[in-house]
Amino acid sequence: MTLPLADEKCLFAAGVPQSDAIPLIYAFPNTYSVGITSLGYQSIWAQLTQRPDVDVRRWFIDGHEPLPRHPEWVGFSFSWELDYAYILQAFTRLGIPRHSGDRPEGCPLVFGGGPVLTANPEPYAAWFDAVLLGDGEELLGQFLQAYQAVRRAPRATKLQHLARVPGVYVPSLYTVTYDGPTGPVQTIEPHPNVPATVTKQTYRGNTLTTSTVVTPHAAWENIFMVEVVRSCPEMCRFCLASYLTLPFRTADVQQGLIPAIERGLQYTDRLGLLGASISQHPEFPELLTFLNEDRWDGVRLSLASVRTNTLTPQLCEVLAKRDSRSVTVAIESGSERLRQIINKKLSNEEIHTAVAHAEMGGLKAMKFYGMVGVPGEIPADLQATIDLLKSIKKQAPRLKIGFGCSTFVPKAHTPWQWYPVNPSAEAKLKELRKRLAPAGIDFRPESYSDSVIQAVLSRGDRRLHRLLERTYEIAQEQGDEVPSTGTYRRAFKELRAELPPLDFYTFTEWPEYRPTPWHHLQGPLPLSTLTKHREQSRALISQM
Protein backbone atom coordinates (compact mmCIF):
# COMPACT_ATOMS: atom_id res chain seq x y z
CA MET A 1 0.00 0.00 0.00
CA THR A 2 1.29 3.48 -0.85
CA LEU A 3 1.10 6.40 1.53
CA PRO A 4 -1.47 9.22 1.07
CA LEU A 5 1.28 11.66 0.16
CA ALA A 6 -1.02 13.87 -1.93
CA ASP A 7 -2.85 14.90 1.26
CA GLU A 8 0.31 15.78 3.19
CA LYS A 9 1.22 19.41 3.69
CA CYS A 10 5.00 19.52 4.13
CA LEU A 11 6.09 22.47 6.28
CA PHE A 12 9.79 22.44 5.38
CA ALA A 13 11.96 22.47 2.31
CA ALA A 14 13.35 19.01 1.62
CA GLY A 15 16.89 18.72 0.35
CA VAL A 16 18.01 17.03 -2.85
CA PRO A 17 20.03 13.87 -2.15
CA GLN A 18 23.53 13.72 -3.61
CA SER A 19 24.34 11.00 -6.11
CA ASP A 20 26.21 9.05 -3.42
CA ALA A 21 23.72 9.72 -0.60
CA ILE A 22 23.20 7.04 2.03
CA PRO A 23 20.05 5.05 1.11
CA LEU A 24 18.06 4.78 4.34
CA ILE A 25 14.64 3.46 5.34
CA TYR A 26 13.10 5.21 8.35
CA ALA A 27 10.35 3.08 9.87
CA PHE A 28 7.65 3.49 12.45
CA PRO A 29 6.37 0.16 13.83
CA ASN A 30 2.68 0.97 13.57
CA THR A 31 0.24 2.40 11.05
CA TYR A 32 0.82 5.58 9.09
CA SER A 33 -1.96 7.27 11.05
CA VAL A 34 -0.23 6.58 14.36
CA GLY A 35 3.32 7.14 13.17
CA ILE A 36 2.75 10.43 11.40
CA THR A 37 1.17 11.77 14.60
CA SER A 38 4.44 11.18 16.47
CA LEU A 39 6.25 14.49 16.78
CA GLY A 40 9.53 12.65 17.40
CA TYR A 41 9.17 10.61 14.20
CA GLN A 42 8.30 13.72 12.18
CA SER A 43 11.29 15.58 13.58
CA ILE A 44 13.89 12.91 12.80
CA TRP A 45 12.40 12.30 9.35
CA ALA A 46 12.64 16.02 8.56
CA GLN A 47 16.27 16.10 9.70
CA LEU A 48 17.10 13.15 7.46
CA THR A 49 15.21 14.60 4.50
CA GLN A 50 17.09 17.89 4.68
CA ARG A 51 20.51 16.21 4.62
CA PRO A 52 22.02 15.98 1.10
CA ASP A 53 24.11 12.98 2.22
CA VAL A 54 20.98 10.90 2.99
CA ASP A 55 18.25 9.54 0.71
CA VAL A 56 15.48 8.60 3.16
CA ARG A 57 12.20 6.74 2.57
CA ARG A 58 9.43 6.18 5.13
CA TRP A 59 7.98 2.80 6.08
CA PHE A 60 4.86 1.97 8.13
CA ILE A 61 3.11 -1.37 8.60
CA ASP A 62 0.31 -0.30 6.24
CA GLY A 63 2.30 1.53 3.59
CA HIS A 64 5.62 2.94 2.52
CA GLU A 65 7.35 5.21 0.05
CA PRO A 66 9.28 3.65 -2.88
CA LEU A 67 12.13 1.84 -1.14
CA PRO A 68 15.79 1.77 -2.17
CA ARG A 69 16.97 -1.54 -3.64
CA HIS A 70 20.04 -1.68 -1.42
CA PRO A 71 19.50 0.34 1.78
CA GLU A 72 22.53 0.80 4.00
CA TRP A 73 20.48 1.56 7.12
CA VAL A 74 17.00 0.78 8.40
CA GLY A 75 16.00 2.95 11.36
CA PHE A 76 13.10 2.59 13.79
CA SER A 77 11.40 5.19 15.97
CA PHE A 78 10.20 3.10 18.92
CA SER A 79 7.62 4.85 21.12
CA TRP A 80 5.45 2.11 22.64
CA GLU A 81 6.79 -1.17 24.09
CA LEU A 82 4.06 -3.39 22.71
CA ASP A 83 4.85 -2.29 19.14
CA TYR A 84 7.86 -4.64 19.14
CA ALA A 85 5.80 -7.20 17.18
CA TYR A 86 5.67 -4.76 14.27
CA ILE A 87 9.47 -4.47 14.30
CA LEU A 88 9.69 -8.22 13.83
CA GLN A 89 7.09 -7.93 11.07
CA ALA A 90 9.20 -5.25 9.39
CA PHE A 91 12.26 -7.51 9.40
CA THR A 92 10.27 -10.19 7.62
CA ARG A 93 8.87 -7.83 5.01
CA LEU A 94 12.21 -6.15 4.35
CA GLY A 95 14.13 -9.43 4.21
CA ILE A 96 16.43 -8.58 7.14
CA PRO A 97 17.61 -11.29 9.59
CA ARG A 98 16.25 -10.61 13.07
CA HIS A 99 19.54 -10.79 14.93
CA SER A 100 22.37 -8.35 14.30
CA GLY A 101 24.89 -11.21 14.56
CA ASP A 102 23.20 -13.05 11.67
CA ARG A 103 23.39 -10.15 9.21
CA PRO A 104 26.09 -10.62 6.57
CA GLU A 105 28.18 -7.99 4.84
CA GLY A 106 25.92 -6.04 2.48
CA CYS A 107 22.85 -6.44 4.69
CA PRO A 108 21.39 -3.17 6.00
CA LEU A 109 22.52 -2.06 9.42
CA VAL A 110 19.62 -1.46 11.83
CA PHE A 111 19.45 1.46 14.24
CA GLY A 112 16.74 2.57 16.63
CA GLY A 113 15.81 5.45 18.88
CA GLY A 114 12.89 6.83 20.85
CA PRO A 115 11.73 6.63 24.47
CA VAL A 116 11.45 2.83 24.67
CA LEU A 117 15.03 2.24 23.58
CA THR A 118 16.44 5.17 25.52
CA ALA A 119 14.87 3.85 28.73
CA ASN A 120 15.87 0.19 28.38
CA PRO A 121 16.96 -1.26 25.03
CA GLU A 122 18.03 -4.63 26.45
CA PRO A 123 14.94 -6.76 25.62
CA TYR A 124 15.43 -5.74 21.97
CA ALA A 125 19.25 -5.62 21.95
CA ALA A 126 19.67 -8.65 19.68
CA TRP A 127 17.76 -6.88 16.89
CA PHE A 128 19.67 -3.60 16.72
CA ASP A 129 23.15 -2.94 15.41
CA ALA A 130 23.09 0.49 17.05
CA VAL A 131 20.78 2.36 19.43
CA LEU A 132 20.72 6.15 19.73
CA LEU A 133 20.16 7.08 23.36
CA GLY A 134 18.48 10.42 24.01
CA ASP A 135 17.52 13.53 22.09
CA GLY A 136 18.10 13.42 18.34
CA GLU A 137 18.67 17.10 17.56
CA GLU A 138 22.48 16.81 17.70
CA LEU A 139 23.02 13.08 18.15
CA LEU A 140 21.62 12.11 14.74
CA GLY A 141 24.08 14.32 12.88
CA GLN A 142 27.02 13.07 14.94
CA PHE A 143 25.95 9.48 14.25
CA LEU A 144 25.76 10.02 10.48
CA GLN A 145 29.03 11.95 10.37
CA ALA A 146 30.77 9.10 12.16
CA TYR A 147 29.26 6.57 9.78
CA GLN A 148 30.48 8.47 6.72
CA ALA A 149 34.05 8.05 7.96
CA VAL A 150 33.75 4.24 7.86
CA ARG A 151 31.03 3.83 5.24
CA ARG A 152 33.13 1.54 2.99
CA ALA A 153 34.66 -0.42 5.88
CA PRO A 154 33.67 -3.94 6.99
CA ARG A 155 30.60 -4.24 9.18
CA ALA A 156 32.56 -4.95 12.37
CA THR A 157 34.75 -1.87 11.83
CA LYS A 158 31.68 0.31 11.34
CA LEU A 159 30.17 -0.82 14.63
CA GLN A 160 33.43 -0.41 16.55
CA HIS A 161 33.75 3.14 15.24
CA LEU A 162 30.13 4.08 15.93
CA ALA A 163 30.33 2.73 19.49
CA ARG A 164 32.77 5.52 20.34
CA VAL A 165 30.23 8.25 19.47
CA PRO A 166 28.72 9.57 22.74
CA GLY A 167 25.14 8.32 23.01
CA VAL A 168 25.51 5.56 20.41
CA TYR A 169 25.08 2.12 21.98
CA VAL A 170 26.19 -0.98 20.08
CA PRO A 171 24.72 -3.89 22.09
CA SER A 172 26.84 -6.59 20.45
CA LEU A 173 29.99 -4.99 21.91
CA TYR A 174 28.88 -5.62 25.51
CA THR A 175 28.91 -9.07 27.08
CA VAL A 176 26.31 -9.79 29.76
CA THR A 177 26.67 -12.67 32.22
CA TYR A 178 23.95 -14.02 34.52
CA ASP A 179 23.75 -15.92 37.76
CA GLY A 180 22.68 -19.06 35.91
CA PRO A 181 20.24 -19.35 32.99
CA THR A 182 17.31 -18.13 35.08
CA GLY A 183 19.18 -15.84 37.47
CA PRO A 184 19.66 -12.07 37.52
CA VAL A 185 22.29 -10.03 35.68
CA GLN A 186 25.74 -10.59 37.16
CA THR A 187 28.13 -8.50 35.03
CA ILE A 188 28.07 -6.26 31.94
CA GLU A 189 31.50 -6.01 30.32
CA PRO A 190 32.43 -3.80 27.33
CA HIS A 191 34.66 -5.17 24.58
CA PRO A 192 38.11 -3.58 24.18
CA ASN A 193 38.19 0.08 23.09
CA VAL A 194 34.47 0.52 23.85
CA PRO A 195 33.16 2.88 26.58
CA ALA A 196 32.17 1.08 29.79
CA THR A 197 29.17 3.41 30.10
CA VAL A 198 27.01 4.90 27.36
CA THR A 199 25.44 8.21 28.34
CA LYS A 200 22.08 9.46 27.14
CA GLN A 201 22.49 12.62 25.07
CA THR A 202 20.55 15.74 26.07
CA TYR A 203 19.69 18.63 23.79
CA ARG A 204 19.88 21.85 25.79
CA GLY A 205 18.67 24.43 23.27
CA ASN A 206 15.51 26.51 23.63
CA THR A 207 14.16 25.77 20.15
CA LEU A 208 12.01 22.67 20.57
CA THR A 209 10.17 20.48 18.09
CA THR A 210 7.23 21.44 15.89
CA SER A 211 5.28 19.54 13.25
CA THR A 212 6.97 19.13 9.90
CA VAL A 213 3.89 17.71 8.17
CA VAL A 214 0.13 18.19 8.51
CA THR A 215 -2.29 15.60 7.15
CA PRO A 216 -5.95 14.61 7.52
CA HIS A 217 -4.79 10.99 7.86
CA ALA A 218 -3.05 11.55 11.21
CA ALA A 219 -4.63 10.10 14.34
CA TRP A 220 -5.19 13.74 15.35
CA GLU A 221 -6.57 14.96 12.06
CA ASN A 222 -4.80 17.98 10.52
CA ILE A 223 -3.11 18.94 13.77
CA PHE A 224 -0.06 21.18 13.98
CA MET A 225 1.91 20.21 17.07
CA VAL A 226 4.26 22.41 19.05
CA GLU A 227 6.51 21.20 21.86
CA VAL A 228 6.24 23.87 24.56
CA VAL A 229 8.43 22.22 27.21
CA ARG A 230 10.57 19.11 27.48
CA SER A 231 10.70 17.02 30.66
CA CYS A 232 8.96 17.97 33.92
CA PRO A 233 10.39 19.63 37.05
CA GLU A 234 8.06 17.81 39.47
CA MET A 235 9.96 14.49 39.50
CA CYS A 236 7.21 12.17 40.67
CA ARG A 237 9.06 9.05 41.79
CA PHE A 238 7.51 6.73 39.17
CA CYS A 239 7.70 9.12 36.22
CA LEU A 240 9.85 8.15 33.27
CA ALA A 241 8.76 11.27 31.36
CA SER A 242 10.43 13.37 34.04
CA TYR A 243 13.50 11.44 35.17
CA LEU A 244 14.60 10.15 31.76
CA THR A 245 14.36 13.54 30.03
CA LEU A 246 15.82 15.93 32.64
CA PRO A 247 16.58 18.78 32.80
CA PHE A 248 13.33 20.70 32.33
CA ARG A 249 13.65 22.83 29.18
CA THR A 250 11.35 25.50 27.78
CA ALA A 251 10.94 26.83 24.25
CA ASP A 252 11.54 30.52 23.69
CA VAL A 253 8.11 32.13 23.33
CA GLN A 254 8.89 35.20 21.20
CA GLN A 255 11.62 33.73 19.02
CA GLY A 256 10.41 30.14 18.87
CA LEU A 257 6.82 29.32 19.80
CA ILE A 258 4.93 32.30 18.41
CA PRO A 259 6.61 32.29 14.96
CA ALA A 260 6.17 28.50 14.75
CA ILE A 261 2.46 28.71 15.61
CA GLU A 262 1.90 31.51 13.09
CA ARG A 263 3.59 29.43 10.43
CA GLY A 264 1.68 26.25 11.26
CA LEU A 265 -1.73 27.92 11.34
CA GLN A 266 -1.27 28.93 7.72
CA TYR A 267 -1.82 25.25 6.89
CA THR A 268 -4.49 24.18 9.36
CA ASP A 269 -6.90 25.44 12.01
CA ARG A 270 -6.00 22.84 14.63
CA LEU A 271 -3.19 23.43 17.13
CA GLY A 272 -1.78 21.06 19.74
CA LEU A 273 0.53 22.18 22.56
CA LEU A 274 2.66 19.31 23.81
CA GLY A 275 4.81 18.68 26.86
CA ALA A 276 4.67 16.93 30.21
CA SER A 277 4.10 20.16 32.12
CA ILE A 278 3.09 22.86 29.63
CA SER A 279 1.59 25.33 32.04
CA GLN A 280 4.82 25.50 34.08
CA HIS A 281 6.53 27.32 31.23
CA PRO A 282 7.61 30.61 32.86
CA GLU A 283 6.13 32.61 29.97
CA PHE A 284 2.95 30.58 29.62
CA PRO A 285 0.64 33.56 30.38
CA GLU A 286 2.30 35.43 27.49
CA LEU A 287 1.62 32.50 25.19
CA LEU A 288 -2.01 32.39 26.32
CA THR A 289 -2.43 36.10 25.59
CA PHE A 290 -1.15 35.49 22.07
CA LEU A 291 -3.53 32.55 21.53
CA ASN A 292 -6.42 34.65 22.81
CA GLU A 293 -6.07 37.19 19.98
CA ASP A 294 -9.15 37.56 17.78
CA ARG A 295 -7.23 36.55 14.66
CA TRP A 296 -7.23 32.97 15.96
CA ASP A 297 -11.01 32.74 16.13
CA GLY A 298 -11.93 29.42 14.55
CA VAL A 299 -8.75 27.70 15.68
CA ARG A 300 -9.22 24.55 17.72
CA LEU A 301 -6.68 24.29 20.54
CA SER A 302 -5.69 21.06 22.31
CA LEU A 303 -3.39 20.74 25.30
CA ALA A 304 -1.53 17.84 26.81
CA SER A 305 -2.03 17.30 30.53
CA VAL A 306 -1.49 20.46 32.60
CA ARG A 307 -0.45 20.79 36.23
CA THR A 308 -3.55 21.11 38.37
CA ASN A 309 -2.53 24.18 40.36
CA THR A 310 -1.72 26.10 37.16
CA LEU A 311 -5.21 25.69 35.71
CA THR A 312 -6.07 29.39 35.89
CA PRO A 313 -9.33 31.08 34.85
CA GLN A 314 -7.46 32.65 31.92
CA LEU A 315 -6.29 29.26 30.67
CA CYS A 316 -9.80 27.78 30.93
CA GLU A 317 -11.32 30.74 29.12
CA VAL A 318 -8.82 30.49 26.26
CA LEU A 319 -9.42 26.74 25.95
CA ALA A 320 -13.19 27.21 25.85
CA LYS A 321 -12.88 30.06 23.33
CA ARG A 322 -10.65 27.88 21.13
CA ASP A 323 -13.15 25.00 21.00
CA SER A 324 -11.45 22.82 23.59
CA ARG A 325 -14.26 21.43 25.69
CA SER A 326 -12.18 19.64 28.30
CA VAL A 327 -8.87 19.63 30.11
CA THR A 328 -6.80 16.79 31.54
CA VAL A 329 -4.89 16.91 34.82
CA ALA A 330 -2.87 14.25 36.64
CA ILE A 331 -3.59 13.95 40.34
CA GLU A 332 -2.29 10.35 40.81
CA SER A 333 -4.48 9.84 43.91
CA GLY A 334 -7.11 11.50 46.03
CA SER A 335 -4.90 10.85 49.06
CA GLU A 336 -2.65 13.72 50.08
CA ARG A 337 -0.60 11.18 52.06
CA LEU A 338 0.11 9.11 48.96
CA ARG A 339 0.85 12.16 46.84
CA GLN A 340 3.57 13.13 49.32
CA ILE A 341 5.15 9.70 48.94
CA ILE A 342 4.97 10.05 45.15
CA ASN A 343 6.42 13.59 45.38
CA LYS A 344 3.29 15.03 43.77
CA LYS A 345 3.21 18.56 45.17
CA LEU A 346 -0.53 19.08 45.14
CA SER A 347 -3.29 19.52 47.72
CA ASN A 348 -6.97 18.60 47.50
CA GLU A 349 -7.80 22.28 47.95
CA GLU A 350 -5.85 23.10 44.79
CA ILE A 351 -7.71 20.36 42.92
CA HIS A 352 -11.08 21.80 43.94
CA THR A 353 -9.89 25.27 42.91
CA ALA A 354 -8.92 23.95 39.47
CA VAL A 355 -12.40 22.45 39.08
CA ALA A 356 -13.96 25.79 39.96
CA HIS A 357 -11.79 27.55 37.39
CA ALA A 358 -12.73 25.02 34.71
CA GLU A 359 -16.43 25.55 35.34
CA MET A 360 -16.12 29.33 35.46
CA GLY A 361 -14.02 29.34 32.29
CA GLY A 362 -16.72 27.58 30.29
CA LEU A 363 -15.23 24.11 29.94
CA LYS A 364 -17.62 21.18 29.70
CA ALA A 365 -15.48 18.35 31.05
CA MET A 366 -12.41 17.47 33.12
CA LYS A 367 -10.43 14.26 33.01
CA PHE A 368 -8.23 13.22 35.90
CA TYR A 369 -5.39 10.72 35.73
CA GLY A 370 -4.60 8.44 38.64
CA MET A 371 -2.68 5.31 39.55
CA VAL A 372 -3.16 2.28 41.78
CA GLY A 373 -0.62 -0.17 43.14
CA VAL A 374 1.73 2.66 44.11
CA PRO A 375 4.45 1.78 46.65
CA GLY A 376 3.21 2.62 50.12
CA GLU A 377 -0.48 2.59 49.14
CA ILE A 378 -3.00 1.48 51.78
CA PRO A 379 -6.79 0.88 51.54
CA ALA A 380 -7.52 4.36 52.91
CA ASP A 381 -5.78 5.89 49.88
CA LEU A 382 -8.18 4.19 47.49
CA GLN A 383 -11.11 5.41 49.54
CA ALA A 384 -9.66 8.93 49.48
CA THR A 385 -9.61 8.83 45.67
CA ILE A 386 -13.24 7.75 45.55
CA ASP A 387 -14.23 10.45 48.04
CA LEU A 388 -12.37 13.17 46.17
CA LEU A 389 -13.91 12.33 42.79
CA LYS A 390 -17.41 12.17 44.28
CA SER A 391 -16.89 15.54 45.95
CA ILE A 392 -15.71 17.01 42.65
CA LYS A 393 -18.83 15.71 40.92
CA LYS A 394 -20.96 17.25 43.65
CA GLN A 395 -19.04 20.54 43.43
CA ALA A 396 -19.46 20.82 39.65
CA PRO A 397 -22.49 18.75 38.58
CA ARG A 398 -22.54 20.32 35.10
CA LEU A 399 -19.00 19.18 34.32
CA LYS A 400 -18.48 15.74 32.83
CA ILE A 401 -15.92 14.13 35.13
CA GLY A 402 -13.67 11.36 33.86
CA PHE A 403 -11.04 9.35 35.64
CA GLY A 404 -8.37 7.43 33.77
CA CYS A 405 -6.43 5.08 36.00
CA SER A 406 -3.34 2.95 35.39
CA THR A 407 -1.36 0.41 37.39
CA PHE A 408 2.06 1.39 38.72
CA VAL A 409 4.79 -0.03 36.47
CA PRO A 410 8.47 0.25 37.47
CA LYS A 411 10.49 2.18 34.90
CA ALA A 412 14.26 2.26 34.33
CA HIS A 413 16.17 5.36 35.48
CA THR A 414 13.51 6.28 38.07
CA PRO A 415 13.76 5.97 41.88
CA TRP A 416 11.10 3.25 41.84
CA GLN A 417 12.79 1.04 39.24
CA TRP A 418 13.47 -1.58 41.94
CA TYR A 419 9.84 -1.87 43.10
CA PRO A 420 7.51 -4.53 41.65
CA VAL A 421 4.00 -4.33 40.27
CA ASN A 422 1.48 -4.78 43.07
CA PRO A 423 -0.91 -7.61 42.10
CA SER A 424 -3.62 -6.03 44.24
CA ALA A 425 -3.92 -3.31 41.59
CA GLU A 426 -6.26 -5.44 39.48
CA ALA A 427 -8.81 -5.70 42.31
CA LYS A 428 -8.44 -1.98 43.03
CA LEU A 429 -9.30 -1.10 39.43
CA LYS A 430 -12.42 -3.24 39.70
CA GLU A 431 -13.35 -1.57 43.00
CA LEU A 432 -12.98 1.88 41.47
CA ARG A 433 -15.27 0.92 38.58
CA LYS A 434 -17.84 -0.44 41.01
CA ARG A 435 -17.81 2.68 43.17
CA LEU A 436 -17.40 5.47 40.63
CA ALA A 437 -19.78 4.51 37.82
CA PRO A 438 -22.93 4.88 39.98
CA ALA A 439 -21.71 8.36 40.95
CA GLY A 440 -21.78 9.48 37.32
CA ILE A 441 -18.01 9.44 36.86
CA ASP A 442 -16.67 8.14 33.55
CA PHE A 443 -14.06 5.61 34.71
CA ARG A 444 -11.56 4.44 32.09
CA PRO A 445 -8.87 2.11 33.45
CA GLU A 446 -5.84 1.00 31.51
CA SER A 447 -5.56 -2.75 31.07
CA TYR A 448 -3.98 -4.42 34.10
CA SER A 449 -2.76 -7.24 31.86
CA ASP A 450 -1.04 -4.76 29.56
CA SER A 451 0.62 -3.18 32.60
CA VAL A 452 2.02 -6.56 33.62
CA ILE A 453 3.57 -7.00 30.18
CA GLN A 454 4.86 -3.43 30.22
CA ALA A 455 6.66 -4.25 33.46
CA VAL A 456 8.30 -7.28 31.84
CA LEU A 457 9.57 -5.12 29.00
CA SER A 458 10.46 -2.19 31.24
CA ARG A 459 12.76 -4.28 33.46
CA GLY A 460 13.75 -6.92 30.92
CA ASP A 461 17.27 -8.06 30.07
CA ARG A 462 18.54 -9.14 26.67
CA ARG A 463 17.49 -12.76 27.18
CA LEU A 464 13.92 -11.58 26.63
CA HIS A 465 14.35 -11.36 22.85
CA ARG A 466 13.67 -15.13 22.79
CA LEU A 467 10.38 -14.58 24.59
CA LEU A 468 9.34 -11.69 22.35
CA GLU A 469 10.13 -13.64 19.21
CA ARG A 470 8.18 -16.64 20.51
CA THR A 471 5.13 -14.53 21.44
CA TYR A 472 5.22 -13.03 17.96
CA GLU A 473 5.39 -16.49 16.37
CA ILE A 474 2.50 -17.80 18.50
CA ALA A 475 0.39 -14.76 17.62
CA GLN A 476 1.13 -15.32 13.92
CA GLU A 477 0.14 -18.99 14.23
CA GLN A 478 -3.13 -18.00 15.89
CA GLY A 479 -3.88 -15.27 13.37
CA ASP A 480 -3.55 -12.49 15.97
CA GLU A 481 -2.07 -9.16 14.99
CA VAL A 482 -0.32 -8.71 18.35
CA PRO A 483 0.37 -11.15 21.22
CA SER A 484 -2.18 -11.49 24.03
CA THR A 485 -1.45 -11.93 27.75
CA GLY A 486 -2.06 -15.64 27.40
CA THR A 487 0.54 -15.75 24.64
CA TYR A 488 3.17 -14.34 26.99
CA ARG A 489 2.35 -16.85 29.70
CA ARG A 490 2.60 -19.70 27.19
CA ALA A 491 5.96 -18.44 25.94
CA PHE A 492 7.32 -18.08 29.48
CA LYS A 493 6.28 -21.66 30.15
CA GLU A 494 7.98 -22.93 27.00
CA LEU A 495 11.21 -21.08 27.84
CA ARG A 496 11.22 -21.70 31.59
CA ALA A 497 14.73 -23.24 31.54
CA GLU A 498 16.23 -20.41 29.47
CA LEU A 499 15.19 -17.24 31.28
CA PRO A 500 13.62 -16.14 34.57
CA PRO A 501 9.85 -16.51 35.07
CA LEU A 502 7.40 -13.67 34.55
CA ASP A 503 7.22 -13.05 38.30
CA PHE A 504 10.92 -12.20 38.45
CA TYR A 505 10.52 -9.27 36.07
CA THR A 506 7.11 -8.11 37.24
CA PHE A 507 6.27 -9.03 40.84
CA THR A 508 9.71 -9.22 42.53
CA GLU A 509 11.37 -6.35 44.37
CA TRP A 510 14.97 -6.09 43.21
CA PRO A 511 17.85 -5.34 45.62
CA GLU A 512 19.68 -2.10 44.91
CA TYR A 513 23.14 -3.70 45.06
CA ARG A 514 22.47 -5.91 42.05
CA PRO A 515 23.21 -4.59 38.52
CA THR A 516 20.08 -3.77 36.53
CA PRO A 517 19.99 -4.77 32.84
CA TRP A 518 20.58 -1.10 31.98
CA HIS A 519 23.38 -0.61 34.54
CA HIS A 520 25.86 0.37 31.78
CA LEU A 521 23.52 2.99 30.30
CA GLN A 522 23.62 6.32 32.09
CA GLY A 523 20.48 8.46 32.32
CA PRO A 524 20.33 12.09 33.44
CA LEU A 525 20.84 11.26 37.13
CA PRO A 526 23.43 8.97 38.71
CA LEU A 527 22.43 5.83 40.56
CA SER A 528 23.28 7.47 43.89
CA THR A 529 20.68 10.18 43.30
CA LEU A 530 17.98 7.71 42.32
CA THR A 531 18.76 5.72 45.48
CA LYS A 532 18.55 8.88 47.57
CA HIS A 533 15.14 9.76 46.10
CA ARG A 534 13.89 6.24 46.75
CA GLU A 535 15.02 6.46 50.37
CA GLN A 536 13.16 9.75 50.76
CA SER A 537 9.93 8.07 49.64
CA ARG A 538 10.64 5.07 51.87
CA ALA A 539 11.06 7.35 54.87
CA LEU A 540 7.68 8.93 54.16
CA ILE A 541 6.05 5.49 53.88
CA SER A 542 7.38 4.50 57.29
CA GLN A 543 6.35 7.79 58.89
CA MET A 544 2.76 7.89 57.66
Image (cartoon, helix red, strand yellow):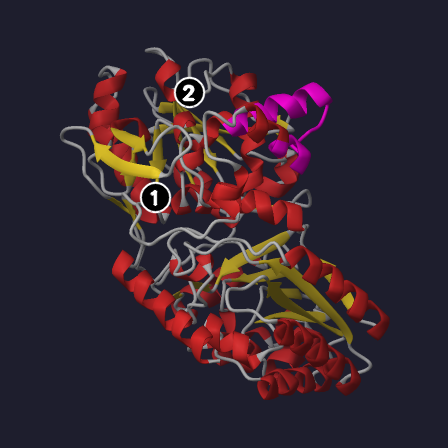
Q: Which residue is mark 1?
A: 518
Q: Is residue 233 left or right of residue 313?
A: left
Q: Is residue 106 above or below residue 466?
A: above
- Kindly indicate whether the residue at mark 1 contacts the one at mark 2 (C-beta within 8 angstroms): no
Residues shaded magenta: 467-489
Q: Is residue 471 magenta?
A: yes
Residue type indicated by callout 1: Trp
Q: Is residue 379 left or right of residue 501?
A: right
Residue at the image position 68 percent from the left and 82 percent from the top = 355
The image quadrant that residue 392 belongs to is bottom right
Q: Is residue 533 above or below residue 104?
A: below
Residue at the image position 45 percent from the left and 25 percent from the top = 498
Residue type indicated by callout 2: His
Q: Position of residue 12 (x, y in %)?
A: 47, 45
Q: Which residue is mark 2?
A: 99
Secondary structure category for the residue under label 1: loop
Q: Earlier in the sequence, mark 2 or mark 1?
A: 2
Q: Position of residue 99 (x, y in %)?
A: 42, 20
Secondary structure category for the residue under label 2: loop
Closer mark to the observer between disc 2 and disc 1 = 1
Q: Position of residue 151 (x, y in %)?
A: 25, 21
Please state which of residues 98 and 486 is positioned toward the viewer in this rendering.
486
Q: Is residue 535 above or below residue 183?
A: below
